[in-house]
Image (tube, rainbow, N blue to C red):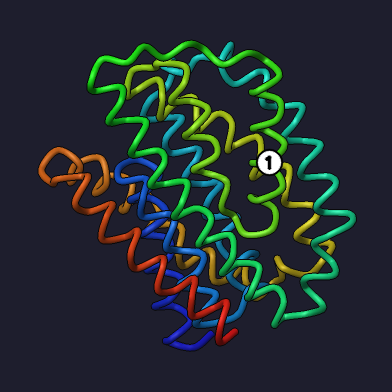
Amino acid sequence: MTLQDALLVALTGLAIGFSKAGVAGFMTLVGPAVTALRGAAFANGMPLPLLVLGDIFVLWRFRGKWDLSVIRPMLPGALIGIALTGVFILGGLVKNPRLFNQAIGVIALCFCALQLYLEYRKARRAAGVEHLPAPPAVGFAAGGVTGMLSTIANQGGLVTNLYLLSQNLTKERFVASGAVLYFFINSSKVPFFCYHHEITRHTLLLDLVGAPFVILGGFLGASVLKHINERVFNQLILWMTVITGLKLLIWP
């Protein structure tokens, strides 16, 4: 384990905890940034145990505040999306690092577009436009897309956010319900990542270094969120992600 590896995984853990419990937009940048530095397979596999730990932290901090009726329709679709991607898509991407990097870049750019749409929806909500709960079929479809994108690039959050936004949840229920979903999704991905050698003994040793930083980032995220302009911060992350996504797409 080099000092560079330890520093990278520590920063990744800090970013994961910070975004899970605080500023969610930060997660959009983590995958593309690590991919640009170390390649897509490493960027996909190394953070997964840290993501599971981040989910557990949020479930503890917001315990009992989730709404399982909102999440339940997403679970079958997410499981199908994970299985299809893990069996038929992930192996081919791992064997083609250039294509894998480009796939991460495309997903990052798509997520930036989704983020802009999400902000538009929030603006409409603030203006008093009524939001109707999404039907179960929409939850199933959102879960499927989330499972697929999360398996390819650990980047399903904005699809989930769009769905949860339609349920008109309070902020704490929003965060806690998302953590329930992602604990299920991230835990289900572990066998596929191990099979395709994205999680290895080396990445697990690195995760031991990153684990305390996930917890630290979680406490920091929850604290800092009270004192910053989240919209400005998310805009900064959004445009940093655009630049990183373009880099991966054009110069993988």
Q: Residue at x 55, y 75 (%)?
A: 35
The image shows residue 222 at horizontal and vertical percentages of 25, 40
Of 22 and 58, the residue lying toward us = 22
Describe the element under mark 1 as helix, strand or loop. Answer: helix
Query: Residue at (19%, 51%) from the top-left corner?
Result: 232
Residue 82 image-quadrant placement: top right
Residue 56 relative to residue 220: left or right: right
Image quadrant occupied by the N terminus: bottom right
Position above or below: 46 against 160: below
Q: Quadrant of the C terminus?
A: bottom right
- What is the crowding at mark 1: few (fewer than 14 residues within 10 Å), some, or many (at least 20)? many
The residue located at (63%, 13%) in the rendering is: 135
Q: Is residue 225 above or below residue 96?
A: above
Q: Residue furthest right?
A: 88
Q: Give whichever of 120, 212 is nearer the camera.
A: 120
Q: Position of residue 166 (x, y in %)?
A: 47, 21
> In the image, residue 25 lies at what x, y percent?
36, 50
Residue 199: quadrant of the picture: bottom right
The residue pinned by badge 1 equals: 145
- Is residue 24 toward the left or the right of residue 167 in the image? left
